[in-house]
Image (tube, rainbow, N blue to C red):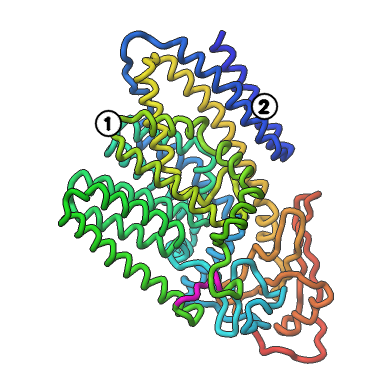
Amino acid sequence: MLLALLAILALFYTVLLWIGVVHSYHHLHILLLVFQYALILPAIWAYLRAHATRESQDARISLPSRTGIVFLFAVVVFPLSWLSTRGLLNPDESGYSFEARIFVSGHLKAAPLVGATANVRATPDEDFFGNHVLRPDGWFPKFPPGWPGVLAVGYAVSAPWIITPILSLLSLVTIAAIGRQIFSEQVGLLAICFAILSSFYLVNSIGMMSHALCGLLSALACFCLFRGLDTGSLSYFWGMFACLGFALQVRPYTAFVLAVVMTAASLWRTRTQPAFCLRIFAIGCLVGGIALFAVLVYNQLYTGNWLQSPYALAAGAQAPPELSFHPARIWQGIAQYGRQTFEESLIGIFPFAYLLAGYAVFSEQEHRSETRVLAAIYISLVFAYLAHPEGSGNFFGERFHFEGIFAVFLLAARGAVLFIERWKISRSAVTFALAVLVMMQLSQQAAAAITVARQGEPYRKLRAATAQVPNGIVFLHDSPGFVAKHFNLNQADWRHAPHIFLVDADPEQRNEWACRYQSSTWTVAEYDPKTHSALLDTQSTSCSVITAQPTK
């Protein structure tokens, strides 16, 4: 009876999920969560309790090998990344990719577009691309160089779409290694199974966002932390701080939060060994000082001010506006985005992973210290990013928490093992319950892939269409599902490129801007959601006065 009920509930959940995908009903998230937690969870609990035995059970579950799990994920993630890099999941990708192209060209900045001003707030709308800084001394995105530098390797081999999946696969290997190091081989394998079946992990393993790199660095730092504490070797602490120092060049605020947690854990665990503790502290100060100096040098090179970051410069301010520690502003952000963040996080992760992680935190006896460190890593990011009150463009989860999600997977896997051992659940019952959840997640993974394809379609169609237009100016026009300022298709050496892309801010000014660039033609490109195609309108330029130097 319970077995049939579980199967029926899982089937209804899948149908409901696909209705939401086909019709883009985002408000169905609430209903999906009700299904999970009010119907499926009690049914699974009742089923497992009905199959409890009086004898202790072996918590080992039949799982694929680590190589098999990584291979299965690779089969999915590489093609999906190839597709997503031709569109967009987040406008930050446009900035990261342009910065990578600049690095490949051998420069730190691109030449400034016509109309650049000393005051970034006065940048003409036609020249303004989101997250970019345009000044007379150069044109560049506002992001730190760590991730664009790695992404540049992909551009150098004409395959930027492979970098993020490779980093994600390396993260899986690292997660399995952490699980084996502090818990067991079984926990490590189960943790990466939870990861590859989580839509949140999938969508952050494709495209050109920086989270995959920073997530790998945070997981490697955690592995080095536990390995260093276990072996007493300082070399692992060098590795931990090196990873955190590199992460500071990728996502500075995230790296700072993780560094505080892992440094505190290192010093607290070694407090009874003063000399060893002092050496760890010294290593942290040295590596941290080098990493911080690199940030200051980067600021100086791009803004001309050691203490002003490009984030601040892009907003015309002295401090990054993304963070706010004002209680009223934080509360406003929670009220505006908190519910969405909560829903997306629960939907995007493997079902009930947060519950299992909590169970591990409160039930663990043998590895209490390690469990608390893992919990602190994730929870610290959750609380730290309350200071980022603006929305992050959540997509199957809060992306600002991604660098700590590996800890949740590990805790959830450990919680599952502890639950099986404590309640003496038979292996066959556990296998069936997991099969039901896997079926649900496979449907959700397919839904995530369709969502990625759908959201990126306008950008893919416009990218392909504009490559075929006559040489000259291309005005990108805002359309349903397409935001022109989020899609910088310009080459780093745009002066010698066949096309120069501008934002179509004012139709009356198109001819004037084409004249300023001395372009013989201009084309307006927009997306038509009714026909799912790009619309192009090419006109000849009519110039009475030359207003700019030739661009070719």
Q: What is the quadrant of residue 476 in the picture?
A: bottom right
Going 22% across and 50% down the picture, which residue do you hit?
Answer: 271
**Residue closer to the observer: 519 or 269:** 269
Q: Secondary structure at mark 2?
A: helix
Residues rendered magenta in the picture: 307-312
How packed mark 1 is, by other alpha carbons closer than 10 Å (few <14, some 14-19, many 20 or more), is: few
Going 76% across and 71% down the picture, which residue do you hit?
Answer: 505
Earlier sequence position, callout 2 versus callout 1: 2
**Residue closer to the observer: 457 or 275:** 275
Q: Position of residue 263 (x, y in %)?
A: 31, 54
Side of 272 relative to 544 (left or right): left
**Residue closer to the observer: 79 or 100:** 100
The residue indicated by pointer 2 is 15
Vertical comparison of 227 with 540: above or below: above
Q: Amino acid at mark 2?
A: Val
Going 70% across and 54% down the picture, which residue do you hit?
Answer: 458
The residue indicated by pointer 1 is 366
Q: What is the quadrant of residue 7 in the picture?
A: top right
Quote the CA–CA distance across marks 2 and 1. 42 Å
Q: Amino acid at mark 1?
A: Glu
- Image quadrant containing the N terminus: top right
Q: Position of residue 105 (x, y in %)?
A: 48, 74
Vertical comparison of 161 with 3: above or below: below
Vertical comparison of 202 with 261: above or below: above
- Image quadrant containing the C terminus: bottom right
How packed mark 2 is, by other alpha carbons closer than 10 Å (few <14, some 14-19, many 20 or more), is: few
